[in-house]
């Protein structure tokens, strides 16, 4: 399926893109800025990245995933809504992909990313085939997310 993600270079949406590519989808995305290391991970996976949110640059996608940071005054969001193109949110998309999986979620004010990376390392050292989506980039993991 051709999926286009608006706000793709954020840690959550970039991680979601990585999981979608792992599942075999053709993924592209738009964002205002593309920063390393997330942009490097996405580029290595062959994800096409489009600078800005001008609606004329939206690709022909079967589904659009709209990032939570985007509001109704965004021209791409308005175009998707006004032309009734199929769309979903990032959390809804992730929820569908992991609905049959056991999930450990790390919550709190400080240390979530570090704690999540430590859990990933512990499970991987036990030779467990885990999936994860971590809001950051680690030198010890190849990607920020994988389905497992």
Image (cartoon, rainbow, N blue to C red):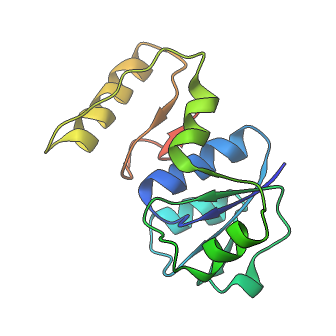
Q: Nearer the viewer, residue 56 or 21?
A: 56
Report whether 73 appears left or right of 84: left
Marker count (numbered): 0
Height in image: 55 above or below 25? Answer: below
Residue drawn at x 56%, y 47% as measured from the top left: 16
Q: Nearer the viewer, residue 142 or 119?
A: 119
Residue drawn at x 44%, y 22% as measured from the top left: 124
Residue sticking out furthest to the left: 110
Height in image: 137 above or below 121? Answer: below
Q: Is residue 33 visible?
A: yes
Q: Is residue 142 visible?
A: no
Q: Position of residue 136 (x, y in %)?
A: 36, 52
Q: Quadrant of the C terminus?
A: top right
Classify residue 141 by image quadrant: top left
Q: Position of residue 115 (x, y in %)?
A: 23, 34
Report whether 119 appears left or right of 7: left
Residue drawn at x 48%, y 62% as measured from the top left: 38
Q: Nearer the viewer, residue 74 or 142?
A: 74
Report whether 147 appears left or right of 103: right
Q: Position of residue 91 (x, y in %)?
A: 51, 43
Q: Position of residue 144 (x, y in %)?
A: 47, 46
Height in image: 74 above or below 101? Answer: below
Classify residue 75 by image quadrant: bottom right
Q: Nearer the viewer, residue 54 or 85?
A: 85
């Amino acid at each position: 399926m051709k999926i286009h993600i608006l706000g793709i270079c954020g840690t959550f949406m970039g991680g979601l893109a990585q999981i979608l590519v792992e599942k075999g989808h053709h993924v592209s995305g738009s964002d205002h800025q593309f920063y390393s290391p997330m942009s490097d991970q996405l580029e290595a996976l062959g994800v096409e990245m489009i600078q800005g949110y001008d609606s004329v640059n939206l690709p022909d996608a079967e589904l659009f995933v709209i990032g939570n940071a985007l509001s109704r005054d965004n021209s791409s969001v308005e175009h998707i809504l006004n032309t009734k193109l199929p769309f979903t949110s990032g959390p809804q998309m992730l929820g569908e992909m992991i609905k049959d999986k056991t999930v450990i979620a790390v919550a709190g004010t400080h240390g979530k990313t570090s704690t999540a990376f430590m859990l990933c390392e512990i499970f991987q050292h036990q030779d467990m085939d885990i999936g994860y989506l971590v809001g950051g980039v680690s030198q010890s993991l190849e990607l920020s997310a994988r389905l497992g």
